[in-house]
Image: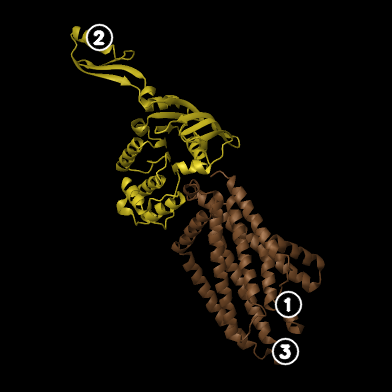
Amino acid sequence: MAAALAAHGLEKRYGEVRALAGIDLEVSEGELFGLLGPNGAGKSTLVKIACGLVRPSAGDVMIAGVRAGSREARAALGYLAEMFRFPDWATADEVLALHQRLARSRGGAAERAVLLERVALTHARHRRVEAMSKGMQQRLGIAQALVGAPRILLLDEPTSALDPLGRRTVRDLLAELRQQGVTVLLNSHLLSEVELVCDRVAILRRGELVAGGRPSELGRGGGVEIETASGPRRFPSASREDTPVIVAELVASGERVYGVRRLTSTLEDVYLEAMQGERPT
Amino acid sequence: MIEDVITIASYALREGLRRRVFVVVLALSLAFGVLYTAGSIAAFHATRDFSGRAAPVDARALTGATLLGLAMFSTLFLGAVLAIFLCGSTVRGDAERGLLAPLVVRPLGRSAVLVGRFVAGAGVCSAYVLIVFGGAVLVTHQAGGWWPDQIVLPAGELVLAVVVICAIALLGSVYFAAIANGILVFMVFGVGLTAGLLGQIGSGLGNATLTTIAREIAYVVPFEALYEAGLRGLTADQTGLTGLVVKLGPFGGGQSAGAALGPWTFAYLLLVLAGAARGFARRDL
């Protein structure tokens, strides 16, 4: 079975600037994939090429086995851009109705109602975009991306304007989509969220893939910290299997042990390590 | 493709209505209508004895042709403003505002977006031009009892002129941001009008070089050739001193462009739209 999204030797240049420098990447059907990286790393460029908004300088992207940008590929996609706007004169319902026509969806009013409910916007169905908060517009953007039940969803910073409640709504929605077998490529700066919801992640730096894998695999063991009567004691090279022995030795030596904590590097640690020497942009 | 074009065109029309474009245009047009009516009544009143006293000219035809020529110019100008407003930000303007990406990632082609926007813009501008020009013809007749020699052909040429401006604005929108494109289209509009004036001066002085330059520019920007042809049609049957005086007047520079103008205009529209489609297809958004 063809990968939901496959990039081979993908390059994009803007004059002298190399936005993507030969990316090879595969996202499987039904996978929730997180793309991480600082501003200017090439995340949005990769997604835009996958949508057909930007043409690659070299290499290609295939969507469900067909060339990205083709009509068939676009029919399989739902997309939420990082910087998007809907016409401020339209209501939420009208925005979705327009996208239903463009996506050839026959879901009608029932589909619109379900989508608005999924992003907690039922109450704003007839509200104009100009009267919506930024967070509401972003949730409407997610609903728009889901019009026509796409097999593949490309979300570029979908939670950047959301409050914690809105983020929770999106997180629940992503979990729901995973259960339905929808493939999701998620661009985000919010490492904790990506770590929570994504099956696999890839880290981009200056247009190159510098790390990738399951979040649990990327995080490495960082030793053991034991809370004793004389204060916390760290054993940086200790593994999980070493823990009972260390505790036994401490107790045998007369130390009181109050707690044991295994230290593992988080996705944030992995990310920061991959970004060493990188300046904020 | 047709379904997509209809969807985009209806979206563009609703956008125009909701953003109160039509209300603004209607208000401006009503103001023009009121001024034109008052001006026409006053002008015909002031010149009613002109024939007998000053020269053997048909004062009513001279006044009517001059007034309707002015109305024709104003209609072209207002139509150009509307065309720029409706088509001038179709690609880069909307892309920079973030409105375009959600549309073009859908299965419809980019050409459908362009054609839909063009159909909506050209349709609205055509209806507008017909209403304003038709109104001006009726007002002129009511005020002075004068009908132009031709009505339908000049109206059609004026409609085509504004449609050409829509196409130019659409092409410009592929390469320039909304404001820059608006300025550019107005400059092209100005070039066309300047060519018309040059042609009139050349014709008055009998200078073939000026006349040739003006004619060639009018073909490069055919809205000018169409406007001139429409202007000429208003007094197509005027001869003698009246015809000469009309020709020397501020709106008397009309030239008949010949049979090639129609086919050239359609070819020009196709070329401009094809250029816009090609540019848009190659553009990163």
Chain B visual colour: brown
Dot 1 amino acid type: Lys
Disc 2 is placed on an element classified as helix
Q: Is residue A119 or residue A269 the one in the foreground?
A: A119
Q: Which residue is mark 1?
A: B247
In this picture, is B94 found above or below A233?
Answer: below
- Cα gap from disc 2 to disc 3, whole angstroms: 123 Å
- Cα gap from disc 1 to disc 2, whole angstroms: 109 Å
Q: Nearer the viewer, mark 2 or mark 3?
A: 2
Q: Label 3 is found on which chain of the structure?
A: B
In this picture, is A31 found above or below B76?
Answer: above
Disc 3 is placed on an element classified as loop
Q: Which residue is mark 2?
A: A245
Q: Where is residue A56 shown, x and y percent of the image?
A: 56, 36
Dot 3 amino acid type: Ala
Crowding at mark 3 (Cα within 10 Å: few <14, some 14-19, many 20+): few
In terms of image quadrants, where is residue B207? bottom right
Residue B54 image label:
3
Q: Where is residue A266 shown, x and y percent of the image?
A: 35, 25
Q: Is residue A172 or residue A168 the one in the foreground?
A: A172
Is residue B52 found left or right of A190 in the rendered image?
Answer: right
